[in-house]
Amino acid sequence: MDIKELQKKAVEVRKGVIVGTHAAKSGHPGGSLSAADIFTYLFFEELNIDPANPDKPDRDRFVLSKGHTAPGYYAALANRGFFPVKDLETLRHTGSYLQGHPDKKHIPGVDMSSGSLGQGISAAVGMALSAKLSGDSYRVYTLLGDGEIQEGQVWEAAMFAGSRKLDNLAVIVDNNNLQIDGPIDQVCSPYPIDEKFKAFGFHVINIDGNDFNDIKKAFDEARATKGQPTAIIAKTVKGKGVSFMENQVGWHGKAPNDEEFEKAMAELDKIGGAI
């Protein structure tokens, strides 16, 4: 898929985030939008997956460690064909299988139930180790929030991954610099993120996480790296694609009202039409 096609898909993923959170009247649009390009590249280009056979044994595994950004994850899965896009309108509704955090028992394409921050990377490390022990060829990917990496468990998992040289593991940090209470460096700074992962034995790549050329180069480099796990530090814009949400901490966990919904969808339609 070429860059323009990926950009168009990313617009649809972003629309899905807005549709879902608006319908739910709750959820986390900011971090879903910042990671939309990463979700898009993973599910339309990078991952060895099959929507017709979500549990195929040789599939690549993906763990959304920052599970609260499920609206972006669900929008990518739906647009990739794992379930109907229309179902995004049921986000967080009673009886819907699309709850506020990913649930592997009920959602096709979800490899790990997640949401307790810091735990997703540990599950991904376990999956990567399992593949090594079993001689399986699948790769494991996990997406973390930059606020999430304030959790100590993240670094325990990183230490283990580095010491076991899990080169089938790619850790992506969505570095949008905002968490629920404000800028991450003001709440509890994890910087320098890249140097920390290097210290734990990772091959580290710094990219613009909203640029598909950068994203492609990073995943190609990660796949070619042997003897080390890879950490991709993706600098992104929280709320990317919706002007009034961009770089606004208030949109971490707030749903758009009817007027904001219309404005956001119009902006995304305009972006899509210009590609």
Image (cartoon, rainbow, N blue to C red):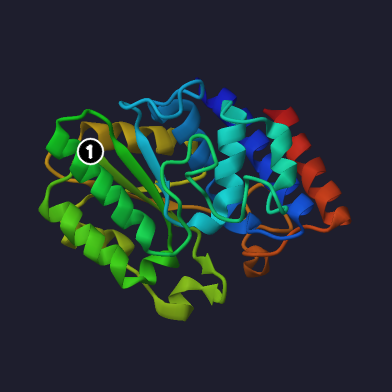
Q: Name the spot of residue 248 as percent of width and height, x first.
A: 65, 65
**Residue 253 visible within the image:** yes
**Residue 204 visible within the image:** no
Q: Name the spot of residue 55 as percent of width and height, x first.
A: 41, 29
Q: Secondary structure at mark 1?
A: loop
For label 1, the crowd category at 10 Å Cα-Cα, with few meaning under 14, some 14 to 19 and many 20 or more, is many
* Residue drawn at (77%, 59%) of the image: 25
Q: Name the spot of residue 226 as percent of width and height, x first.
A: 14, 37
Q: Is residue 105 left or right of residue 207?
A: right
Q: Nearer the viewer, residue 100 or 176?
A: 100
Q: Quadrant of residue 190?
A: bottom left
* Residue drawn at (20%, 29%) of the image: 136
Q: Name the spot of residue 191 as percent of width and height, x first.
A: 34, 69
Q: Quadrant of residue 271?
A: top right
Q: Amino acid at mark 1?
A: Asn
Q: Where's the C terminus, which quadrant? A: top right
* Residue drawn at (56%, 76%) of the image: 181
Q: Quadrant of residue 219?
A: top left
Q: Is residue 249 left or right of residue 143?
A: right
So how many labels did they put on this image? 1
* Residue drawn at (47%, 72%) of the image: 184
Q: Which residue was labeled with disc 1?
A: 168
